[in-house]
Amino acid sequence: MAQRQRIVYLVLAVVLGHVILISAQVNAGPRTSVLESFTFGLFAEMQRALTSARDSVVGVWSGYVQLRDLRAENEMLTGAVADLEYQLQEQRALARRSVGLQKLLDFRQVVELATVSARVIAGDATPYFRTLTIDRGTGDGVYADAAVLAPKGVVGRVVGTPGRRASRVQLLIDRNAAAGARFERTRTTGVVMGGDDENSLRMEYVSNFSDVHVGDRIVTSGTDGIYPSGFNIGTVTHVQPGSGLYLDIRLDPMLEFSTLEEVLIVVSDGAIATMNREGE
Amino acid sequence: MRTWVIVLGLAVALLVQTVMIRVVADGTAPIDLVLVVVVFTALFRGRVVGLWTGTVSGILQDVLSGGIVGISGLTKSVTGFLVGIVGSELVVSTIWHRVVVLLAASVFHTLFFLGVHSLLGTMMLTSAISFVLVQAVSNASVGMIAAALVWIVPKVVRRVRHRRTLLVRRNWIMG
């Protein structure tokens, strides 16, 4: 009897402890403790080792057993396409900025983004795919809130305190993620947030009177101070008047988040502000 | 099931969940390997160990996911405790019984998890029912394979060894 009572008290204590822990974070926002940083760093090293081992096995299998030359050529071409897509985005962003600059007749030097490339070493620890772990950290110049990009568009931002050799990236499709955005065609601004379903986005704070069509391309506006302006986010798949003042807009992301392997992290914090100022 | 086996099982489940599932299923497979370990631990070691395993593994998952720490901890500890009660009150000795418990535990855990997130407004799935069912079936399938590997393979190996020993003895006697 006494043992059963002890177990009931234990369960109540555990549940209460969790509720207090959750409440503290909901009220004050999530904070990274030393224990969290340590656990993340430790697991990141194990994930890095396992990813390397996995890549080695996959590399041996597909490199030597399967068509070796075709694979090498394919890798080279895939890399070239990724580079070109990224360059195209940069050029488009540059062109848009140039128009603004020409209007002002004020040709100032355009600041190029300093980026480092990173490899995705792990996905989310839960089945609700919302974060990634990458193999770059503070040792490579990565800081909290750094923008993470891919050749086809925006991936997300670094969340929490990055480790020395690894960082956690919150994907843009996370319901709690947001980015300042604008329509490429009309330049109307809004905020893009993670959607309710997997791999979907929604755009908020766009007036019911705005001119929005299915297929419109959305790019970053740079107003959030995290993402540089002009980078691809997605295209409109659904638009209808909302119940309040704003349109109900759903987007299809440009990226296939689940298959990301390489990303670029923006490491020049000051450059983004300068770039965005010049883009406006 | 010794404590180090549980710790090793959790570490392997977390690593496979984060590193391998992305590759095997393009990161889209709704499998919770950690929950599978918690359920089997609770079935074999009882409600208190199930509770603690759920707490530790859930908090680890939360820490690695970067979300609110405690949600997975809460849902997994309660699930581990309830499975422990089921394991001690009912006869769940065959693989099929355990798979049914795993299926029920997966449905309960996912609904509980999504419920807490909905209350906090941090996650809402419009197709929650299909997600819950797919995850339950995926977890049960993985659990069944794991159970088969853990319990059937050693038995088969023992039987093969026993037969080989008998054969050697017979040959020795015969000449």
Image (spheres, rainbow, N blue to C red):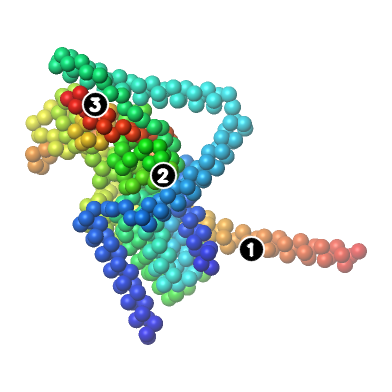
Can residue A111 be seen by looking at this rendering?
Answer: yes
User: Would residue A71 be found to the left or right of residue B133 on screen?
Assistant: right
| Distance Cα–Cα, label 1 vs label 3 | 66 Å
For label 1, the SS is helix
**x, y percent for residue A133:** 40, 43
Q: Residue at x 41, y 40 (%)?
A: A139
Q: Chain of mark 2?
A: A
Q: Report the disc number at residue B155.
A: 1
> Mark 1 against mark 2, which lies toward the viewer?
2
**x, y percent for residue A154:** 31, 33
Amino acid type of disc 1?
Lys
State the residue lying farthest toward the bottom.
A1
Amino acid type of disc 2?
Arg
Quarter of the rendering containing residue A33: bottom left
The residue carrying mark 3 is A275
User: Would residue B18 be found to the left or right of residue A179 on screen?
Assistant: right
> Pointer 1: residues within 10 angstroms few (<14), some, or many (20+)?
few
Q: Is residue B71 above or below residue A225?
A: below
Same chain for the residues under marks 1 and 3 in the image? no
Q: Residue at x 25, y 57 (%)?
A: A25
Q: Earlier in the sequence, mark 3 or mark 2?
A: 2
**x, y percent for residue A22:** 27, 60
Same chain for the residues under marks 3 and 2 in the image? yes
For label 3, the SS is helix
For label 2, the SS is loop
Q: Chain of mark 1?
A: B
| Distance Cα–Cα, label 1 vs label 2 | 46 Å
Amino acid type of disc 3?
Met
The residue carrying mark 2 is A164
**x, y percent for residue B153:** 62, 59
Can residue A127 be seen by looking at this rendering?
Answer: no
> Pointer 3: residues within 10 angstroms few (<14), some, or many (20+)?
many
